[in-house]
Amino acid sequence: MTINQTESINPTPEQLNAIDAYWRAANYLSVGQMYLRDNPLLREPLKPEHIKAMLLGHWGTTPGQNFIYAHLNRLIQTHDLNMIYLSGPGHGGPALVANTYLEGTYSEVYSTITQDEAGLKKLFTQFSFPGGIPSHVSPECPGSIHEGGELGYSLSHAFGAVFDNPDLIAACVVGDGEAETGPLATAWHSNKFLNPVTDGVVLPILHLNGYKIANPTVLARISHEELQQLFYGYGWIPYFVEGDDPTAMHQAMATALEEIILTIKTIQHKARVEGETSRPRWPMLVLRSPKGWTGPKEVNGLMIAGTFRAHQVPITDPATNPAHLAQLENWLKSYRPDELFDERGRLRPELQALAPQGPRRMGANPHANGGLLLKDLLLPDFRDYAVPVTSPGAVNESDTMILGKFLRDGIRLNESQRNFRIFGPDETLSNKLNAVFEATNRQWEGDQLLTDEFLASDGRVMEMLSEHQCEGWLEGYLLTGRHGLFNSYEAFIHIVDSMFNQHAKWLKVTREIPWRRKIASLNYLLASHVWRQDHNGFTHQDPGFIDLVVNKKAEVVRVYLPPDANCLLSVMDHCLRSRHYVNVVIAGKHPAPQWLDMQSAIMHCSRGIGIWTWASNDINDEPDVVMACAGDVPTLETLAAVSILRRSLPDLKIRVVNVVDLMRLQSSTEHPHGLDDTAFDLLFTENKPVIFAFHGYPWLIHRLTYKRTNHRNIHVRGYKEEGTITTPFDMTVLNELDRYHLVQDVIDRLPQLRNRMAYLKQEMQDKLIAHRQYINTYGQDMPEVRNWTWENR
Amino acid sequence: MTINQTESINPTPEQLNAIDAYWRAANYLSVGQMYLRDNPLLREPLKPEHIKAMLLGHWGTTPGQNFIYAHLNRLIQTHDLNMIYLSGPGHGGPALVANTYLEGTYSEVYSTITQDEAGLKKLFTQFSFPGGIPSHVSPECPGSIHEGGELGYSLSHAFGAVFDNPDLIAACVVGDGEAETGPLATAWHSNKFLNPVTDGVVLPILHLNGYKIANPTVLARISHEELQQLFYGYGWIPYFVEGDDPTAMHQAMATALEEIILTIKTIQHKARVEGETSRPRWPMLVLRSPKGWTGPKEVNGLMIAGTFRAHQVPITDPATNPAHLAQLENWLKSYRPDELFDERGRLRPELQALAPQGPRRMGANPHANGGLLLKDLLLPDFRDYAVPVTSPGAVNESDTMILGKFLRDGIRLNESQRNFRIFGPDETLSNKLNAVFEATNRQWEGDQLLTDEFLASDGRVMEMLSEHQCEGWLEGYLLTGRHGLFNSYEAFIHIVDSMFNQHAKWLKVTREIPWRRKIASLNYLLASHVWRQDHNGFTHQDPGFIDLVVNKKAEVVRVYLPPDANCLLSVMDHCLRSRHYVNVVIAGKHPAPQWLDMQSAIMHCSRGIGIWTWASNDINDEPDVVMACAGDVPTLETLAAVSILRRSLPDLKIRVVNVVDLMRLQSSTEHPHGLDDTAFDLLFTENKPVIFAFHGYPWLIHRLTYKRTNHRNIHVRGYKEEGTITTPFDMTVLNELDRYHLVQDVIDRLPQLRNRMAYLKQEMQDKLIAHRQYINTYGQDMPEVRNWTWENR
């Protein structure tokens, strides 16, 4: 987009007539997809056998979206815009399929869906049909980066798409149903985070068609004045296009879009050329048009168009009810298909000319197939950030603090590529990634005060107190071919459970679509985890996100629990380079013992699981017991327990197994990272007790290992929903994951020890009592716990 | 509240001075909680040993909330208001503890925290201390129905609290951080759902203290004009109180609150006496005051008060740094404790008199301990709604459609009690609870059109397209002692995963607090489930909510999968009568075979699990195979498989076990509903193959049963993240849960059949091929599947 071109180009009546014809063509194809399996151009009278057996789809939103798409096509053409289209009401799938077909993209991607009568027949039949395509704007639909199945995220995705794409405009249709969701309601504030110089533009189009499935919508039933105030208050300039007469609406829409594009260009010119720095008031459009516009007005005596009854399929029984068959035929013919398609069934050339060309077509814009644009992230050598660990446990460091330095330099390396951002709900400092602010700031277009820190109009860190926004922005950023990281408190990542679900589904489906290119992984760094909530307590304790994650397809999910900083560096380097996964990394932020030097950390993380020989004394022998651990705090407690056991029972052969890559526990037949049974048995033995200290809910380990030979002997300790404001060690005691419980677990599971070691069990119980007394008196952990260090034997 | 009293009562300067003293007292107690373990009244010079070992808590929001609380106290007193207080920024726990202590509630509830110096010492020491109380406005704090640990839900909870409480005002402090969350951003629209005649009032107090943890807040950095427009647009009248000079602020606050209460009374008078029916514009307050107001201005050369650095503990090392110790002492003394507390350490009587009396105190208001007000829900006899089932499978019905009739009459029975509501995100009709609209409407205060259906200004159904709102409203409604049901699509209940987490935690903790009374259970009805997404496809398929639910404490969670309408009736009757649980009920909405007559359904549901003898042929014998099922679709496929097996292998002894109450599968040592091992073994045998067709992700069954004797032989089929728009039966095929796969599973697991039954396996594979061909041609399931019925043998 050339930002100095500031004249609006209003269409002639003839041009508007042509747009109307294009709109009718898209509407015709949309109704065809919902109803027809044959006779796609109505070249013969419509008969029951031309009708699909099951009638599926959502008509209500479709004509409005066709209207928008047709007008955006004109805008792209006349102003040579680089624009993508996001459909918030993604159940309007027929509209997007119709339009990408009309513009030619669809046939380029799916060669059997040709631009003729045979292709039309296939196009119609495949819609919402087994073996065909889904009803939403799914990954199968070219030009889509937003399926719109679960509502609420369109605007956040749109903003994510235009960050660092100064040339791009994301037209984002927001349904008035979707506008009621929480995530969407706060997404309007994204304009406080958009830099007019270095980012592109989001053009929100609020589509007020008045009804959801069965209810009116809130925004359609407040006064015009309130609606206007609401969007002024959100920081936008709303333009209104309202009505139902097509001729008047075409004129109004064209005029409004011209004014909008003029406003956008003026803002960009001011910011980019004149150096204006105050936050601009971007334009948006409110389109108020009837639900099911141009469709049947009445069926069976009930009003349809303009009511909630237009939501799905307006005429439900044309195959069995001749009157309804006739009504459907009239409806289809009202679009005058003969004027729109030639003899062969191809859109007439004068209408074809209305669509943009090549990659300017919204269905073919490469930003909507982000893998096409993806450049490798430049990363420094993570070994350079290694914590020197002369012997295990010799130093204490904050794992995330170390990671922050690596990320800082990653930010620097990609400064000119501008393709890496860190997202977080006001927790980047709290999660101890402080070092990143040596290299960048938080992007913030609101007012600034002298008391602020690390704010700038251009920065690599995006912080808004909305996990939904962080997730939505990041997804949009990744889907358009960039890289990123979401850092969050562990407990509150559940706020975006459903968004993770949807993104994982998107990845699963796009993996299987040949023309979709792989995108960068969605990386979560979950710090401030369950075991350290000294300030916040029970509400901030929930390690269950991984339970949700492992429900998704093994091909797209990865879970890592690095036990120390060097492992975290190795894991994060791997995650940031990976493609098309969701990587969940859980790490501590408080200073804690460091176990592995960098060389060992790399080997350990590349294996993902392994015996820590330096902590074990079963070398070249079968162990008596396996002490397994996953997560930083469980690792610490396990080693402390091992220490006690080795002191009291030097002959006991203990093997320490640490798990970084959780999916190694699963079978190789279930997950690509899974160990085969032989390898698993070599680590965990076939019959020895395994005491497993786990970061999360204990049953997850059982779920992952239930098929293993030695499963019956695996005893897992983990978080069992006990906690409050208390000391770090007490958190482990409350959940019986602490060293003293682990030692008792070992004694209980080794018959040869039970009697002999009764004294040690008693000692452990005494320790627990002493601990309780001490913390209740002093409010902190006993010195022997606070100051405990691993001694190399 | 008498609604004809409309004169404002402005305080005198002396009264404002007294309020200031009360505020200082609360601030003093707040700082004391964060810092002191001894010398609570500074009767001797402050020494390091008086300081707590770990300094925890959030100062930033606290003085502002103390300010609000003191002024609300005055308002309650002068206008005799029935008011509760919700703290959105719940990490301001010290404020609420201080205020409920000052008003006397705290000592009534916790008799050791006396109103004297000794009590003060305990009050200070216990805060954020092991064995003491959490840092948030947790369940331990009297007057709290909202902990404010996870941000976003305060306003929704407040609205839930005032529905059907026409006399109640819920003052709801919304932090400007919380205001950035999605759920909060849409909660402002709750005013379109509040009936001014039959509901109470929410008074939102947006507390603009400018900063979150480390960032400025969005709403604090937009212009006054934008902020005003935003709230006008949301439908409110914002009153502004802004500044930092206490004297001026006290005057401004008192004046604003007087105007607000006048406005509220005028609105109520118009609606209740004059019959005004248009949606009122309710007042709200914007309080702009410095973060950490009255606290240290500077520490170590860095500005604190009024900046993000005031968020937690402003002076971090008074025990070791003498200068900081002095600064802390000065800070504490700046509140002039000697003027506030008498010799014994008791708040001076003239200040005590500022607090309301008895249940008018916000800490003692019974609405904030809802169980005190809870009345039993009146329910019709669910047996009266029984589907007549002459033989299993003889009739087809929509399970939720039947349930709708029961709910309809439940609504009627509680019409005068006004203590039951149904919540849903525009899905009550879609989920087929249509019958409820014979008895009531959706409550809707927006404009209405002739094309609308089932809307009224007063109704029992609350529908907004926001799962967050539905959940938050319902929680607020339950927490204040009423009953309700949330109906949702199964996949999208994940949107409120984190809200469920927090509510389950609330229930867990309140169970253990003697003065907290039990409340009605939170009931979810999840329809439109994973197996039937004919219209919507993959994005609408996710049965993982139960995986999340079972992570929470066994004492508070229940999961039911009724296989037919009579079971659904029995289960829902039980859930609606229960207390202090989260009940998840998953049910089908499409017409489906009905298996049990009401008598059998009651017996089956009261056992929760059982052998369906009519489908089994292992009577008085050990079976060769157990066919287990949970969920309506898995039950259907299991019975269809059994039917095939019994036809082809009449000698094979098959036992059919159906599971309604999922927690029966868990051990009795893990869950109160769990079967003991003997009972489990009697059902599932100790060594026979079990083919388990499950509604959800298959590994959940393994997780629940991994300790059972026969676990190794349990083979589970369930949803494994395969699906799209397709036919109902094809959904089961894609996930290998269909009858043909189940039959093959049986053959594969019985060595004696493997060779003999190769032909049957081949037949099953042929069926699957035929199925694929048929649906790809006709877009619907083969007649033999569609028309399949169980034949009683």
Image (tube, coloured by chain):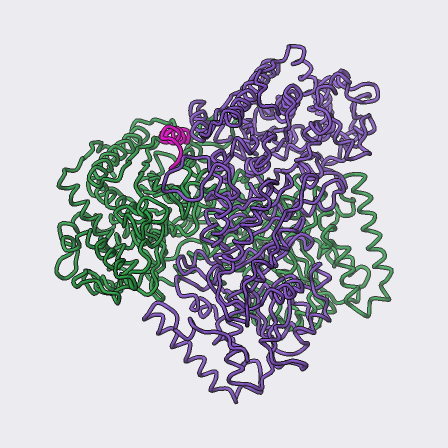
Chain colours: A purple, B green
Q: Nearer the viewer, residue A192 or A681?
A: A192
Q: Residue A256 vs residue A20: left or right? A: left
Compared with B398, A15 (above or below) is above
The part of the chain drawn in magenta is B220-236
Q: Quadrant of the N terminus of chain A?
A: top right
Residue B532 seen in render: no
Give x and y (percent) for residue B134. Answer: 36, 59
Give x and y (percent) for residue A771. Answer: 39, 74
For the image shown, how many numbered marks are present on the structure?
Answer: 0
Compared with B649, B102 (above or below) is above
Tell me where residue B623 sits by quadrant. bottom right
Give x and y (percent) for residue A114. Answer: 81, 29
Give x and y (percent) for residue A508. Answer: 69, 48
Q: Is residue A414 magenta?
A: no
Residue sitting at 43 percent across and 56 percent down? A539
Residue A84 seen in render: yes
For the stretch drawn in magenta, the main secondary structure is helix
Q: Residue A772 vs residue B751: left or right? A: left
Q: Nearer the viewer, residue A134 or A35?
A: A134
Q: Residue furthest top?
A: A13
Q: Nearer the viewer, residue A114 or A312?
A: A114
